[in-house]
Amino acid sequence: MMDIQKLKDEFVSLYGSAGQPEVYFAPGRVNLIGEHTDYNGGYVFPCALNYGTYMLVRRNAASTIRFASTNFEFKTEVPLDNISKKVDNQWVNYPLGVINELVDQGMNMEGIDLLFSGDIPNGAGLSSSASIEMVTAFALNAMFGVKLTALDLVKISQRAENEFVGMNCGIMDQFAVGMGKKDHAVFLNCDTLEYDLVPLALQGYRLVITNTNKKRKLTDSKYNERRAECEKAVAYINRKRSIRNLGELSLAEFEQLQNLIPDETIRKRAYHVVSEDARVLEAVHALKTGNLVFFGELMYASHDSLRDNYEVTGFELDTLVEEARKIPGAIGSRMTGAGFGGCTVSLVQKDMTGPFMEQLENAYTRKTGLKPGFYVAEVGDGAKKL
Ligand code: GLA
């Protein structure tokens, strides 16, 4: 657990003792199933974690925004009349992008001092970026009386990441981080944004998150490449049937239409999306009916498709999942998030989580030379004031 008093002390030592800061929190997320479907108008099934980003904020007398974080050395001060300019490739662009969006929505910005502190690993596929965006959006909306709804804040945060930061992500992460609920998973239709909070009744199982600790490279460019491939698939299919995105097709319909796609790679990408969408529906049903063993099988099938059809896994993620399959007590495992590195999520019998982590660590380290990180996930609430 984060030591809030320690953060407050750090805040005072950075910015002085003129009044108490307010404290806000937004979680990270883990996606249980439904990967690379969000930007195709498909289904996703993530949940919010009890790890995330804390933000301490207080008005200052200067006309500037001061940024600091316990996770990064870099600190800066941005004059209010200069907020629309990006700060190199720095972490502050996430909150700054959100501030710009809020100002566009009519927020009357004043000078503030900010201290961020995250307890989720950065860049590990657990949405540290959506978490810092949403904590900023939620806090400033409340402080400055902007009166936007939670869904508006989700959309603003996604736009900040797309347009200000320059990462063309879908809406899943911000949505899970903003709308998640303790002990529930968020079943979201990314086309209509209709959603349902499904009780995460895991019976005698636990979610174990394993970080490959692989340094991710080129993730954003590969991600954008996959998006473009899906758009190509839509264009081919539109020669015969008019669709806006792949999420509109059932598996049976896709099988009828797939010959319209001459390029095998593009066809495989589209097949992943359509089949993954079907798996999400099955997984939600499996969870609701208490069939966790089937839920686990769908997780393995999702990983296989991300490896073979969508090609976003890589040696480290594949090794974690392959080794998990061999360990007694594990009933499902898959990569989570964008891929290319980052984390897997596994469904493991509660009384076997200790031996599971030990065996997985040994096998993974032997094969990759890397030491993995482990988190037994607790499913927490979306963004909130503390
Ligand atoms: C990243 C993006 C999400 C989603 C996933 C893949 O986490 O931010 O919008 O596309 O990858 O499912």
Image: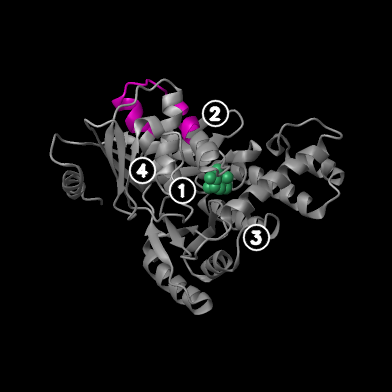
Q: Earlier in the sequence, mark 4 or mark 3?
A: 3
Dot 4, crowdedness within 10 Å: few (<14), some or many (≥20)? many
Classify residue 380 as left or right of residue 365: left
Disc 4 target residue: 380
Decide if residue 382 is in sight here. no
Disc 3 target residue: 307
* C-alpha distance separating marks 4 and 3: 29 Å
Q: Amino acid at mark 3?
A: Arg
Measuring from the top left, give residue 99's x and y in whole percent: 40, 32
Q: Is residue 43 above or below residue 332?
A: above
In the image, the residue with mark 2 has its CB under 8 Å from the nearest atom of ligand 1: no
- Give the label on residue 290, or none: none
Decide if residue 298 is in sight here. yes
Q: How many marks?
A: 4
Q: Earlier in the sequence, mark 2 or mark 4?
A: 2
Principal secondary structure, stretch drawn in magenta: helix
Disc 2 target residue: 194
- Element type where label 2 sits in the image: loop
- Element type where label 3 sits in the image: helix
Highlighted range, magenta: 137-157
